[in-house]
Image (cartoon, rainbow, N blue to C red):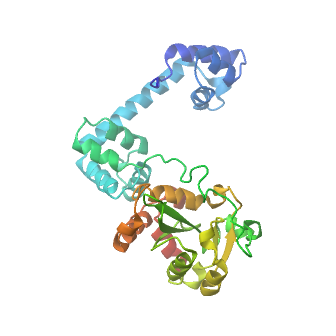
Amino acid sequence: MESYRRININEREEISRLLANRLSFREIAKSIGRSPSSVSREVGRYKDGRKRYRAVGGQVHATRRASGRRKGKRKIAKNTDLFRIIFEKLELFWSPQQIAGYLKINYEDTCMHVSAETIYSYIYVFPRGNLREELIARLRRAHKKRRRKGHSRAGQSSDLADMTSIEERPENVEDRIIPGHWEGDIIIGGARKQTALGTLVERTTRTVILVPLKNKSSIEIRREFAKEIKKLPAQMRLSLTYDQGREMAQHKLFTKQTKMKVYFAHARSPWERGTNENTNGLIRQFFPKGTDFRQVTRKEVKRVQKLLNERPRKTLNWQTPYEAMQKLLR
């Protein structure tokens, strides 16, 4: 795979000339052997870039950005307090973006401010060794889709009795204005996919509840989900959106026990439970595919739940889910 090359001065001159000739970004990209998105980003750094873009100015900006990236790496290397905080948060499995947001909010001194990209870059410029491997191991991995094509739970309709479609869910649930609406799922594990972990995510605060399960039966899932849900205040128990997996066959009894309405997403439509799908990806960082959940203690499950809920989230203006939840319950 060819490594990425930054746009050079010759390419910038060609971009400037072709813009003057009123060519489209796609045509310019084809001419210089770049992607249209690269050309768009380059020109887009200028206000009214199609008219104002100049090759020399673009090169100056690029040089300054490169200098800033190097300066950021040196800042981490020289500032022991900054490095210590970054390392401590990585140990808690915070992402570089979460760490950067935390630093910006909690430290007025700009010497303690650094971008997420700089943190990533700094980690990867480490010489090979235990520390580098340890830091990289804390970074979030890119995940493939959790459910493989052909899997028995891959969005297939299960014809559950008396399902209430997501189309009947109130509009204010979609807006995330009113808290108390959750999304649910199970993560499958074990060599024969016979073990599972329940996951519940509140749509407004992104609070996560992990539910230890002895098996994948609908009885076990209804019982354990209800047990966790009933610990919540009444105002935080409004609805649950689930896929059409057969493990939710006892949804009517679940609603009777929790007073919580269950809505079912359309078949093969994971984006209708996007918050839960994304959270499952985060959970896989701790419990990779193949994990036998019968070998994972409740204490370990709840430790991971705590770690997830104490991470600052960009979508919450760098509050943690726990902090966001507490504000709503005051």
In this rendering, position of residue 185 left or right of residue 116: right
Looking at the image, the residue that sits furthest to the bottom is 257
Residue at the spot x=59%, y=16% of the render? 32
Q: In this orientation, which residue lies closer to the viewer: 190 or 187?
A: 190
Q: Give the x, y percent position of residue 80.
A: 23, 48
Instruction: Decide which of 45, 41 is in the foreground and name it.
Output: 41
Q: Is residue 182 visible?
A: no
Give 216 or 18, whichever is nearer the viewer.
216
Compared with 205, 133 (above or below) is above
Q: Residue at x 57, y 75 (%)?
A: 218
Q: Is residue 189 left or right of residue 38?
A: left
Q: How many marks?
A: 0
Q: Position of residue 253 (x, y in %)?
A: 64, 83
Residue 125 percent location from the top left of the image: 31, 35
Most distant residue in the right direction? 168
Residue located at (58% from left, 20% from top): 54
Q: Position of residue 55 (x, y in %)?
A: 55, 18
Q: Quadrant of residue 177?
A: bottom right
Q: Residue at x 34, y 73 (%)?
A: 299
Question: Observer-nearest residue: 218 or 31?
Answer: 218
